[in-house]
Image (cartoon, rainbow, N blue to C red):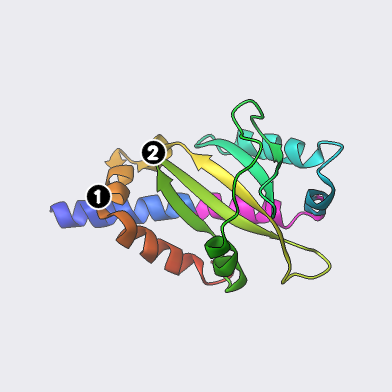
Amino acid sequence: QLDFEAASASAASSKVIDDYARSLELWAQQPLMSRILVGDPDGEIAELMRTGLKRLPGMRHISCIAMDGTVVASTNPAQAPPKIPVTSKRVAEFQKGVRASIDIEGGELRLHVPVNSHSDEKQLIGVLQARVDPGALIVDERPSWSVLRVQGSGQLAQHVGKLRERGG
């Protein structure tokens, strides 16, 4: 029974994470994301993220990060640090076709998706980072977040493996 509950909770949390990753991917593919390269001077990236965040109540906040680590836009500028490193490991994953990467740090899930250039889809120009409320992973009163934390990196590795396939 416990194995069934764990598998069920894991599947439910995977669906929630997939839904969030798809939303972030759609935002990352918007033509206005090219403004990352000039620092989003008119705030359009921030506005897109704030509008989208209202539809995804499980996301706490979203940052748009340039390749040098500069936070170009954020749904909560007061909480966003001026720089968030874009690691070479994350860049390598995205260049290999990983659709999204996941970190668990300090009791918080962080979801990252690549932002590619519209003129050259292989050129990574930035990253969207979403901080996800652990409560969003509790689906049908199943403790999905606990399962993710207990299963740790093995579960995340399985999920990232699923996200490697483009489009699903």
Residue at image coords 60%, 64%: 91
Residue 33 position in % (x across, y down): 77, 51
Q: What residue does disc 1 label?
A: 150
Q: Is residue 20 magenta?
A: yes
Asked which secondary structure carries label 1, the reply is helix
Q: Which residues are magenta?
A: 18-32
**Residue 50 lies in what quarter of the image?**
top right
Residue at image coords 61%, 35%: 81
Describe residue 48's horizontal placement relative to residue 63 as left or right: right
Describe residue 43's horizontal placement relative to residue 11 as left or right: right
Residue at image coords 32%, 46%: 144
Q: Amino acid at mark 2?
A: Gly
Name the mark on residue 114. none
Asked which secondary structure carries label 2, the reply is loop
Q: Dot 2: within a 10 Å radius of its alpha carbon, few (fewer than 14), some, or many (20 or more) residues?
A: few
Residue 152 position in % (x across, y down): 30, 54
Pair 1/2: label in front: 2
Describe residue 27's horizontal placement relative to residue 1 as left or right: right
Q: What residue does disc 2 label?
A: 106
Describe residue 157's horizontal placement relative to residue 129 as left or right: left
Q: Amino acid at mark 1?
A: Val
Residue 143 position in % (x across, y down): 28, 42
Residue 65 position in % (x across, y down): 67, 47
Seen in the picture, residue 49 relative to 160 is either above or below; the reply is above
